[in-house]
Image: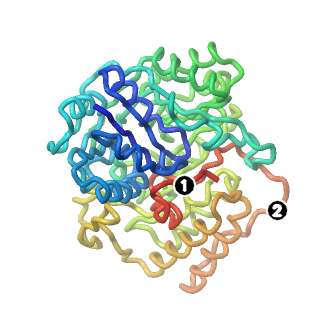
Amino acid sequence: MRTLLVSTYELGHQPLNLASPAAALAAAGHEVRCVDLAVEELDPAAVDWADVVAFSVPMHTATRLAVQAAAVIRGRRPELPLCAYGLYAGAAPGFDAALAGEYEPALVDWVGRGGGPVAARVELGRHHPAVPRREGLPELSRYARLLPDGTGAEGGVLAGYAEASHGCVHRCRHCPVPVVYDGRIRTVPVETVMADVDRQVEMGARHITFGDPDFLNGPHHARRMARAFHQRHPDLTFDVTTKVEHVLRHRDLLAELAASGLLFVVSAFESVDDRVLERLAKGHTAADAATATELLRAHGIEVRPSLLPFTPWTTVAGVVDLLDFVISHDLVANVDPVQYSIRLLLPPGSLLLDDPEVGAVLGPYDPVALSHPWRSPHPGVDELQAELAQVVEAGGEADAVDVFPEIHAVVARRAAALGRPGPRPLPPRGPGRRAPRLSEAWFCCAEPTKVQLATAGGRGHP
C-alpha cells in the first residue's frame, strides 16, 4: 500500500514519529512517503499518490494542526482512509482509525488491510522497533538548533532527536501520558537507539535531545544509554527530560551523566504552590525544585523548567510567587517565555475531569480546541493568562531575558489592580547567566499560535 505519513509539529525536531513508523511500514513491504508540515508544504501530488494517509499526533499542538490538515485532504479526496496515531490519537476527531501507545504494529496492520474504519485502540504490547528510517525527511538544518550560550550568536549547532523509552511510571493528573500508558514504560533497546543516533550524527547532528517523557524512569537503562552514547560519540552533548523527584532520588547518577555530555535537563516544575503540586500529584514541592536546581548546577548541568502556571487553583498572588522563584534562583534565562502562559488542558480522559473542584469550573467539551474549557474562580486570573499569552506569542523566539521584563510588568499591573504586591524587582540587566537551549521555544501543551493555525498546510522553520 502507498502510505503517506504526515507530521504537523514535533517541537522543532526532525520527526521521529515519521521515521519510526516509516521503518516499520517499509519492512512490511509498503511504499512510504513522509511530509513534515512544520517545514514543508503539503504536495497535492503526494495526496493523489497515496492509498492511505496517517497523521502523527504526539501532542496537543500537533493534534490541533493535524485536524485542520486532515480536513484539507478530505476536501480533495473524501474517500481516502485517514488514521491518527500517537499519544493524542484518542482526542483527534474525524479520522477512520485512532491508534495510541506502541502504535507501530497496529499501524502496519491497518495499512495492510487497506485502511478503513476501526475502533480506537491503545496498544501497549512489547515489540522490537526497527531502527527509524530518516531517509526522505527534511535535512536537520531545517530544524531547531542547540544554542550553547542561549543566544544563538554563533548560529547554533545541528541537533537530533531520539527516544530511549515511552510512557511513564508516574500518574501526574494533568499529564496525557498516564491516560494512555497507565503507569507503564516501554524501553527501546540501546542498540536501536544508538543506531538512530549514529545516523543523525552522519547527517551532521552534534547534540541529541532524548525526548522520553522521563529519561530516568528506568535509571539503569538511562545509565546504559548514557554510557553507550558517550562511548560512541564522546564529543557530542545531549539533553533529557526528567522529574524533580528523579533528580533528587538519582542524584548519584548526575556526575556520570554530566561526564557523558548531559548539558541541560527539562524538568516539570509546574508551580511553586505546594497545594497545586499536590492536586497535580507531582511528587515534589517548591523546595524540592529549588534543591534540584542547585544539585544540577553543582554538576555543571542547567535546568530548563516547564511550567503550568494557570490551573483552577491558581491566584494572581501565585503567579507573583512563581516569578519571585524564577528571579531568586537565577532562572530568568532558563525559562522559555511561553511557559508563563500555559493553561491547564483538559482533553478527553484527563485524570482531572473527576476532580470536584475542576468540575465546578468546567465547561462542555470544545471539539475545536480538543479540550474542556474552564474559567478560574479567582479574580483577574483569566485576564492575566490571556494577556501573557499575547505577550509571549508576540515575542516569538526572542531571548527569554528580553521578554521577561514585559512579563514582569504585566504581572505587576494585574497584582496592583487587585491591591496586591507585585513580584520582586527585576534582576539587573547585563551579561548574567546564560543557559543552553534549543532554538524552538514553543511547547507541547501550548495552544497553537495564530501563525501555526493559519499555515497548517505547511510552514518554514524560522
Residue 242: x %, y % from top left:
50, 37
The answer to whether the residues at label 2 and label 1 have Cβ atoms under 8 Å apart is: no
Task: Decide if residue 18 is on the left or right side of residue 149.
Answer: left
The reply to whether residue 177 is visible in this rendering is no
Q: Which residue is mark 2?
A: 429
Residue 403: x %, y % from top left:
69, 65
Give the mark nearest the N terminus, 2 or 1.
Answer: 2
Q: Quadrant of residue 301?
A: top right
Residue at 21% x, 39% y is 115
Residue at 55% x, 35% y is 240
Task: Decide if residue 61 is on the left or right side of residue 391.
Answer: left
Residue at the extreme right of the image, as rendered? 430
Dot 1 amino acid type: Arg
Residue 293: x %, y % from top left:
62, 43
- Above or below, 68 against 239 in this view is below
Q: Which residue is mark 1?
A: 459
Q: Quadrant of residue 61?
A: bottom left
Dot 2 amino acid type: Arg
